[in-house]
């Protein structure tokens, strides 16, 4: 079961053109396209006539034409023309979804359209600010991951795994010596870990040209239903970053929006805004290549988890201290789903 009255990323802005784009979101088929003035549109990807996916058709001016019998639909989902007849049959329409283009992404609201408030989209202003250089993850395409979307949030809220999964890039044994603090916020969970006066991780040592120890921070804000801002970096010892004087040194964000495809597959959209080496092509390549490798190492872990969860979904799992932020986030999502469905408890695949 998914939370429907929420914003999800449906696509990168560059993915949506005047050619139909098919994408399964929350187990529902959606087709995206642009009108002549560049406006992004999202419709149900199913013709109301004989159920052919509209994504197999074509965009004619501002309308989407079914590839089977040529019915044409406008941006509201209304059928406006049927070849061979003058009148359009009553009720000939498909569902349209509210969309907002922001931060380089097309955001979609899959629930009650009357409740779609653009102010609820995460304020990830770094994506559009001239003082930040942005590298789009996976060459500006979503990662398709064969796992439930909450496993991605679990992964990002528990950065202790860096010491094991990413030991040769962004991991360090010192991470385990500093426990994370968990705070519940209005629409999400915040995890904070501050690491003073320790050796930098290999990738950070290279990027910052550090000669000695650093002060390192890991601050993750997870927002319902699946957005995560991973605010991380390293700076010279005593520079004030641990007291909140950020960003400086090697300061960047890993922004992640996990949009469920189905109960066991997810589209992950991610990007890296950074506030150092803004004009460095070499540093762009670090984020484009090395950090993609980091993300793919996580993908391998999460997909392996999902395989085992599918084999025995009722197997008891033991929790440890580092799970606190992820468990809090799962509880919050379950509460929101239960409230949306008017029940006292959430059902479905809230906790794989």
Image: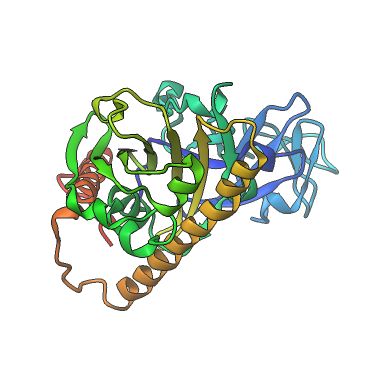
Considering only vertical position in the picture, is 300 above or below 14?
A: below
Left-right relation of 273 to 90: left
* Residue 105 in view (yes/no): no
Name the foreground residue: 257 vs 282: 282
Q: Position of residue 341 (x, y in %)?
A: 26, 42
- List the single residue furthest toward the right: 84
Name the foreground residue: 159 vs 17: 159
Q: Residue at the spot x=34%, y=73% of the render?
A: 310
Q: How is the image coloured?
A: rainbow
Task: Name the quadrant of the C terminus.
Answer: bottom left
* Residue 14 in view (yes/no): yes
Name the foreground residue: 24 vs 121: 121
The mark tally for this picture is 0
Left-right relation of 71 to 119: right
Q: Residue at the spot x=19%, y=51% of the render?
A: 327
Q: Position of residue 117 (x, y in %)?
A: 42, 23
Considering only vertical position in the picture, is 58 above or below 161?
A: above
Q: Position of residue 229 (x, y in %)?
A: 39, 37
- List the single residue furthest toward the front: 211
Left-right relation of 309 to 115: left
Q: Residue at the spot x=21%, y=55% of the render?
A: 176
Q: Position of residue 128 (x, y in %)?
A: 56, 24
């Amino acid at each position: 079961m998914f939370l429907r009255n929420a914003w999800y990323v449906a696509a990168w802005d560059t993915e949506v053109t005047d050619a139909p784009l098919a994408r399964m979101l929350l187990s529902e088929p959606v087709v995206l396209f642009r009108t002549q003035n560049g406006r992004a549109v999202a419709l149900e990807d199913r013709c109301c006539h004989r159920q052919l996916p509209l994504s197999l058709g074509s965009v004619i001016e501002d309308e989407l034409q079914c590839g089977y019998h040529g019915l044409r639909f406008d941006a509201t989902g209304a059928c406006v023309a049927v070849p061979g007849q003058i009148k359009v049959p009553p009720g000939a329409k498909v569902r349209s979804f509210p969309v907002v283009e922001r931060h380089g992404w097309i955001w979609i609201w899959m629930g009650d359209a009357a409740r779609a408030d653009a102010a609820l989209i995460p304020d990830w202003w770094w994506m559009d600010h001239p003082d930040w250089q942005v590298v789009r993850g996976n060459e500006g395409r979503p990662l398709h991951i064969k796992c439930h979307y909450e496993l991605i949030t679990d992964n990002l809220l528990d950065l202790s795994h860096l010491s094991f999964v990413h030991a040769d890039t962004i991991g360090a044994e010192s991470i385990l010596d500093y426990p994370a603090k968990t705070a519940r916020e209005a629409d999400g969970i915040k995890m904070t870990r501050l690491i003073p006066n320790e050796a930098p991780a290999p990738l950070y040592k290279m990027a910052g040209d550090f000669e000695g120890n650093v002060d390192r921070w890991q601050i993750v804000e997870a927002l319902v239903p699946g957005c995560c801002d991973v605010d991380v970096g390293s700076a010279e010892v005593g520079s004030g970053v641990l007291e909140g004087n950020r960003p400086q040194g090697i300061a960047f964000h890993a922004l992640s929006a996990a949009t469920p495809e189905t109960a066991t597959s997810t589209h992950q959209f991610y990007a890296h805004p950074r506030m150092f080496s803004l004009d460095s092509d070499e540093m762009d390549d670090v984020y484009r290549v090395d950090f993609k490798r980091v993300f793919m190492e996580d993908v391998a872990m999460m997909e392996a988890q999902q395989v085992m969860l599918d084999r025995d979904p009722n197997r008891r799992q033991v929790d440890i201290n580092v799970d606190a932020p992820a468990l809090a986030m799962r509880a919050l999502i379950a509460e929101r789903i239960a409230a949306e469905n008017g029940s006292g408890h959430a059902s479905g695949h809230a906790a794989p």
